[in-house]
Amino acid sequence: QVQLVESGGGLVQAGGSLRLSCAASGSIFNVMGWYRQAPGKQRDLVATITRAGIPNYADSAKGRFTISRDNAKNTVYLQMNSLKPEDTAVYYCNAQTLIPYGVDYWGKGTLVTVSS
């Protein structure tokens, strides 16, 4: 059974930093990533990373956020620096399985609140 467990969310002041972690289990994962959903808005991409370590960032994350992963631990991380109030959202971990290829799984989300 596939499980994704996020941690690291919380309350931080603008300009501060947080590091999110997502521990995945139950399969081998290809692309892993982070998405976020602010109140009243759709869920949007933040960043993804392939199993080979190639990242992809949304424009809003470029230069401030860094995604990384540890394949041995099936864990993906999101280091968020220079946080802004508009980064406030529930952050969801996503992982796509390698075998079978491309099956999507989601974590339950972790809340990030950035105060001004």
Image: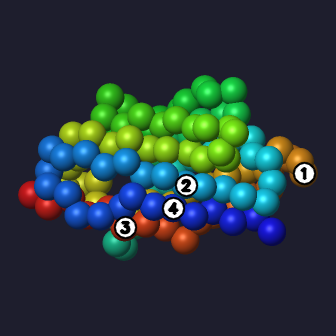
Mark 2 or mark 3, whichever is nearer to me: 2
Query: Is 8 placed above or below 64 here?
Result: below
Please give the name of the residue rendered at 14% of the width and 51% of the height, measured from the top-left corner.
Answer: 14
Three-letter residue code for mark 3? Leu
Residue 37 visible in this rendered orientation of the protein: no
Three-letter residue code for mark 1? Pro
Q: Earlier in the sequence, mark 4 or mark 2?
A: 4
Tell me the residue that label 2 is attached to: 22
Q: Earlier in the sequence, mark 3 or mark 4?
A: 4
| Rendering quarter of residue 59 | top left
Q: Please give the label number shown on residue 100.
A: 1
- The span from disc 2 to disc 3 (Cα, nearest Å) is 13 Å
Residue 80 visible in this rendered orientation of the protein: yes
Badge 4 element: strand
Give the side of residue 88 with respect to residue 55, left or right.
Answer: left
Q: Are marks 1 and 4 in contact (CB under 8 Å)?
A: no
Between 89 and 3, the one lying in front of the other is 3
Badge 1 element: loop
Tell me the residue that label 4 is attached to: 6
Give the side of residue 113 with respect to residue 78, left or right.
Answer: left
Three-letter residue code for mark 4? Glu
Mark 4, Cα crowd under 10 Å, few <14 / some 14-19 / many 20+, is: many
Tell me the residue that label 3 is attached to: 111
Q: Position of residue 41 (x, y in %)?
A: 39, 67
Three-letter residue code for mark 2? Cys
- The span from disc 4 to disc 2 (Cα, nearest Å) is 4 Å
Badge 2 element: strand
